[in-house]
Image (tube, grey):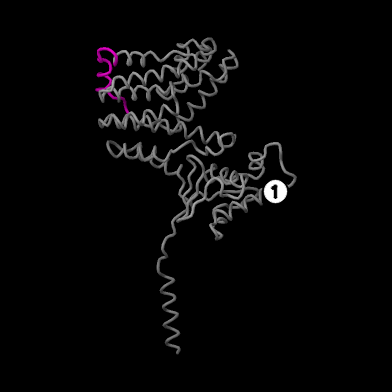
Amino acid sequence: MHAAHATSVSHVRALADQPRPSTPRPSVRLFGSIRVEHGEQTLGVRDFGSVKAKQVLEILLAARGRAVPKDRLADMIWGENLPQNVSGALESYVSVARRRLGFGSRGGHRLIVTEPQAYRFAIDAVDLDLDRFDDFVRRADTASGAERRRLLEAAAELARGDVLDDEPYADWAEDLREEYRSRVLEVRVAAARAAMGEGDHAAAARHADAALAIEPLERAAVETAMLARYAAGREHDAARAFARYRDAAADYGIAPAADVVRLAESIAGDGALAQARLTTAPATSVGDDATIARLATIGAAVVELIGELEGTGPAPLPVLMAELRRSGSVQAALQELLATGYGAPAAARVLQAA
């Protein structure tokens, strides 16, 4: 009996020492509307118990692992219309979100962590689409050829819609949404150019069109859209791509960029410039994300200043941002704005100070 008991204990210990099968991490999607998947179970926009519980979860996810103080969380959720018992209301919504994330277990408590006067989402415990996007872009920056294009297209494939587009009017979602809108634009342009380099004109046009859906005045995107169609023998479609760009510029009361006009004229004429552009394709680097973000911030600040000085409002923003993305130069962007004549006096003063 003692021998049997010893054998049983040894067997249990042996089983305990064996590596346990790894449990897949929950998958979280923030591109488009929020979605959480764990095994065969899925939570969509309406599955988090309440709108406020969903918003608490989204704010914590958007913090990317950083703790969010409770007073800051309350301000983002309610603004000036705070409930009488703020702490109690937050605890209630966090509890609801945890239960839903647990999928019937207490797993949600491991995901939403309580800290002193704050909450934090354990971001390393989930597979977040924004993290995968960032990883693909980082790897693409050091890759080349077909591998680089594959990584860029993998990143682009993840970006199905704006970040948190189920909260289109939430101020707390806007910064993250704009950051990734700009990054996806860069990825789409780089993927279009990479496809052009491999002679895949259909894919190049598709990526360029996706970039233009984000920013209709993105010069690199419209040029690639035109060249891809021209290279495929679709001159009329190239002309239509230019016409869409020209109409978008007219909507903002500005003239199309001179070099884009020259490319359109070449495609409609002898094709010399278009052929030269096809044989001297620009580099396809996604660029330094920190620099892009910094330039975008500077550009937005400059537009605000121009609006104050000239009363033009935000209309020059597409011109300014398109040139920032193309050249990476604040000075070049302001020069482009000067060339349009839109808000020119203020632009000249800002350029002089820049």
10 is higher (above) or lower (below) than 46: below
What residue occupies the far front of the structure in this picture?
236
In depth, the one of 132 and 332 nearer the eye is 132
Does residue 84 appear left or right of residue 250 in this picture? Answer: right
Q: Is residue 311 magenta?
A: no
92 is higher (above) or lower (below) than 286: below
Query: Dot 1 surroundings within 10 Å: few (below 14), some, or many (20 or more)?
Result: few
In depth, the one of 197 and 309 nearer the eye is 197
Does residue 179 appear left or right of residue 197 in this picture? Answer: right
Q: What element carries label 1?
A: helix
Residue at the (32%, 27%) spot, across then down: 283
Q: In which quarter of the image is residue 167?
A: top right
The N terminus appears in which quarter of the rendering? bottom left
Percent position of residue 35, x then y: 50, 46
Percent position of residue 226, x then y: 33, 22
Percent position of residue 17, x then y: 42, 70
Does residue 205 appear left or right of residue 338 in this picture? Answer: left
- The kind of residue tagged 1 is Ser
Residue to which mark 1 is pinned: 87
304 is higher (above) or lower (below) than 94: above
Residue at the (59%, 37%) spot, across then down: 172
What residue occupies the far right of the structure in this picture?
84
What residue occupies the far bottom of the structure in this picture?
1
Residue at the (45%, 11%) spot, across then down: 339
Region in magenta: 267-283
Q: Is residue 277 magenta?
A: yes
9 is higher (above) or lower (below) than 138: below
